[in-house]
């Protein structure tokens, strides 16, 4: 094994340990916030709003930790993930459910556009594919503007199913489309006009998760002609 690979394995292992160590206190915070939200002893709207912020912050931290785990898996060269069968509709519903807390904090609606193609069955890693889609949705929420909802739809295109995530934010500029899903692209995207940074380097994580599920992600022109769109393309 080359020294480069050994270093990658070591860094991946260290990241994995940090992920594990972060999950325990986060789980405790999340559980206590959920408990306090369910009690009737919270006095006043300000306290309730503070608890909602704590809950949303826990969700955001969990998302960042998940993405850190994806980087650790990629550095270690992990290629084997559990394969299951599920429908595209189930995949989208799960991803929307996990993004609702973030959407509420941004006052952005997220919704599934009805389509019979969403009933198509897939067999791959549901966990990895769900993480890829979740990162695309969260990026849409983060960058959406003017109250335009984030819309998710599914369409059959030959031997693939394409899940489209559309939002009302500024589109990824043509010169960034090939690199926005790379590590370098996310580093340079922060503060760059026409590029999109995602909290927790989300677009890079989306590509890592898509690769693990045998899928592809890309930025495309929005079908409506306004806003931005991402595609998650999955073999049937």
Image (cartoon, grey):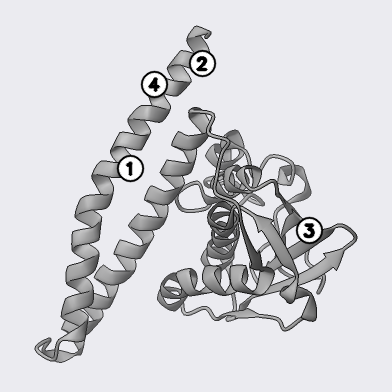
Q: Circle 1: is it few (<14), some (14-19), or many (20+) Cα within 10 Å?
A: some
> Which residue is pictured at 17% across the width and 70% down the height?
32
> Which residue is pictured at 58% across the width and 81% down the height?
147
> Which residue is pictured at 37% across the width and 60% down the height?
60
For discs 3 and 1, the disc positioned in front in the rendered view: 3
Q: Earlier in the sequence, mark 4 or mark 1?
A: 4
For discs 3 and 4, the disc positioned in front in the rendered view: 3
Q: Earlier in the sequence, mark 2 or mark 3?
A: 2
Q: Circle 3: is it few (<14), some (14-19), or many (20+) Cα within 10 Å?
A: some
Q: Earlier in the sequence, mark 2 or mark 4?
A: 2
Tag shown at residue 236: 3
Q: Are marks 3 and 1 in contact (CB under 8 Å)?
A: no
Tag shown at residue 19: 1
> Which residue is pictured at 29% across the width and 38% down the height?
18
SS under mark 2: helix
Q: Earlier in the sequence, mark 3 or mark 4?
A: 4
**Placement of 134 over or under 69, stated as above or below:** below
Q: Is residue 167 visible?
A: no
SS under mark 1: helix
Q: Which residue is mark 2?
A: 5
**Placement of 81 over or under 55, stated as above or below:** above
Q: Which residue is mark 4?
A: 10
For discs 2 and 3, the disc positioned in front in the rendered view: 3
Query: Residue 230 location in percent, x, y?
Result: 70, 59
SS under mark 3: loop
Tag shown at residue 49: none
In-front residue for pair 121/205: 121
**Placement of 97 over or under 200, stated as above or below:** below
**Placement of 77 over or under 31, stated as above or below:** above
Query: Residue 114 location in percent, x, y?
Result: 72, 84
Location of residue 144 (image quadrant): bottom right
Q: Earlier in the sequence, mark 3 or mark 1?
A: 1
């Amino acid at each position: 094994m080359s020294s480069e690979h050994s270093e990658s394995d070591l860094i991946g292992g260290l990241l994995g340990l940090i992920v594990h160590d972060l999950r325990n206190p986060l789980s405790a915070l999340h559980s206590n916030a959920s408990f306090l939200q369910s009690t009737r002893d919270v006095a006043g709207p300000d306290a309730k709003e503070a608890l909602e912020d704590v809950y949303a912050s826990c969700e955001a931290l969990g998302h960042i930790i998940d993405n850190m785990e994806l980087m650790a898996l990629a550095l270690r060269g992990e290629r084997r993930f559990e394969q299951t069968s599920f429908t595209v509709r189930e995949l989208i519903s799960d991803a929307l459910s996990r993004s609702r807390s973030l959407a509420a904090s941004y006052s952005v609606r997220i919704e599934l556009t009805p389509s019979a193609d969403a009933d198509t069955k897939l067999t791959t890693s549901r966990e990895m594919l769900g993480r890829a889609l979740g990162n695309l949705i969260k990026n849409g929420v983060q960058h959406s503007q003017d109250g335009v909802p984030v819309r998710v739809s599914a369409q059959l295109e030959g031997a693939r199913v394409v899940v489209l995530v559309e939002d009302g934010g500024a589109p990824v500029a043509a010169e960034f489309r090939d690199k926005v899903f790379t590590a370098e692209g996310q580093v340079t995207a922060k503060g760059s006009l026409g590029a999109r940074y995602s909290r927790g380097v989300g677009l890079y994580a989306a590509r890592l998760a898509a690769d693990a599920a045998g899928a592809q992600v890309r930025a495309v022109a929005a079908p409506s002609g306004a806003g931005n769109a991402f595609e998650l393309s999955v073999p049937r």
